[in-house]
Image: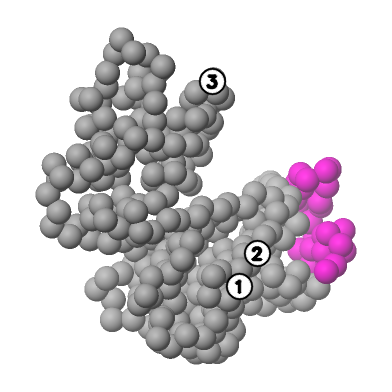
Amino acid sequence: MEHQDHYSLIINALNHPADAALQAQLAAWRGLDVANEAEYTSIKRIWEQSANVEERYTGRDLDQAVAAFTARLEEKIQYNSPAKTYKLWWRAAAAVLVFGMAGLWGYRELKSEAFIFRSTNDQQDSILLVDGSKVFLNKHTQIKYATTFSKSQRKFFLLKGEAFFDIAKDPAHPFTVLINKSAVQVLGTTFNIQNIDSTIALEVKSGKVMFESTDRDPGHILEKGMAIRYDQKTGKTQKYLGLNTQTNSNWLYKELNFVDATLPEVCALIEQQYGVKITIQGNISNIKKLNANFKNDPLKDVLDVLRMTYKITIDHHDNQIIIKQ
């Protein structure tokens, strides 16, 4: 693979962690050679030290920014091919890096702020931040956060998935969760956020938060027991006065609460909670709704209730479930 190709691949994959095709292509390239893995690690280390991705261009001259990145990259990565130099490509690679971070940033910030990336697969996880805040991660979640917070604010990036936040109170340093172009601002509270597909769902367990869907949004104040859903494709926002039990943080407490839930809604949460794949065959009516509560119940018991409620047949083999009339 040519240098220009694999650098584009690395940067694009780092900028789009949710792109499965890109991640697979990168993994294949990394596995070809030990040198590839070392090169990837060096580029990733520099990328993680970049400034916050939502920062706007501060006016720094592009040539200066590219030159700075080029110098830093050349310090970090050594090639075994003495007969060929890549000065022109280094310049192009640096330009890709500069533009790839959702805007240009000052190189001085590159040295002052480092980020940690974490993702969960089929397991849940939790982290303790430097300020004492706790974040619980659901399965298939991707996050990014700074190793140390700035003097004026605390920022956390929910790139994909779902997380429950227990934020340490610090009025002088507001805590902000960034979800794509949206943001949740808090002082000290507990709340749950989903960032799945094109929908953001926020529910507040205690305290008060403000949700901003975009830079132009004046914001929505949410207090304990309130929730909001935002469709990032249509821009539509729905606000709830009570917690929407179909999408709240019951995953954290191993609970499933259903209120007038259709079969597809029920199946989606069962898949998430028990790590199974459910296929619905045929046209099954959504007229019947499920009202039930499960807490640490075996999957078999939950499926038995579905059989009786919807009058359906369920075939369950390993982690595959087929539902039909």
Residue 285 appearing in the image: no
- Whether residue 206 sits left or right of residue 52 in the image: it is right
Where is residue 124? Give x, y as percent: 68, 59
Write down the quadrant of residue 247 in the picture.
bottom right
User: Residue 113: percent from the left, percent from the top?
Assistant: 38, 59
Tell me, for residue 126, which label it has, or none: 2
Q: Earlier in the sequence, mark 3 or mark 1?
A: 3
**Residue 290 position in % (x across, y down):** 72, 72
SS for tag 3?
loop
Magenta span contains residue 289 = no
Mark 2: few/some/many CA within 10 Å (<14, 14-19, 20+): some
Residue that mark 1 sits on: 134
| Discs 3, 1 touching: Cβ within 8 Å | no
Q: Which mark is residue 33?
A: 3
Residue visible at 26% across and 37% down?
71
Mark 3 vs mark 2, foreground winner is 3
Distance in Å between CA atoms under marks 1 and 2:
7 Å
Percent position of residue 325, x then y? 75, 52
- At numbered mark 2, what does the secondary structure look like: helix, strand or loop? strand
Q: Residue at x 26, y 45 (%)?
A: 98
Residue 14 vs residue 38, the one in the foreground: 38
The quadrant holding residue 261 is bottom right
Q: CA distance from mark 3 to mark 2?
A: 33 Å
Looking at numbered disc 3 in the image, what kind of residue is underneath it? Asp
Q: Nearer the viewer, residue 206 or 174?
A: 174
Color encoding of the figure: one colour
Query: Which region of the structure is painted magenta?
Result: 296-325
Amino acid carrying label 2: it is Ser
Task: State which tag comes first along the sequence, 1 or 2.
Answer: 2
Asked whether residue 299 is drawn in magenta, I would say: yes
Q: Residue at x 22, y 60 (%)?
A: 56
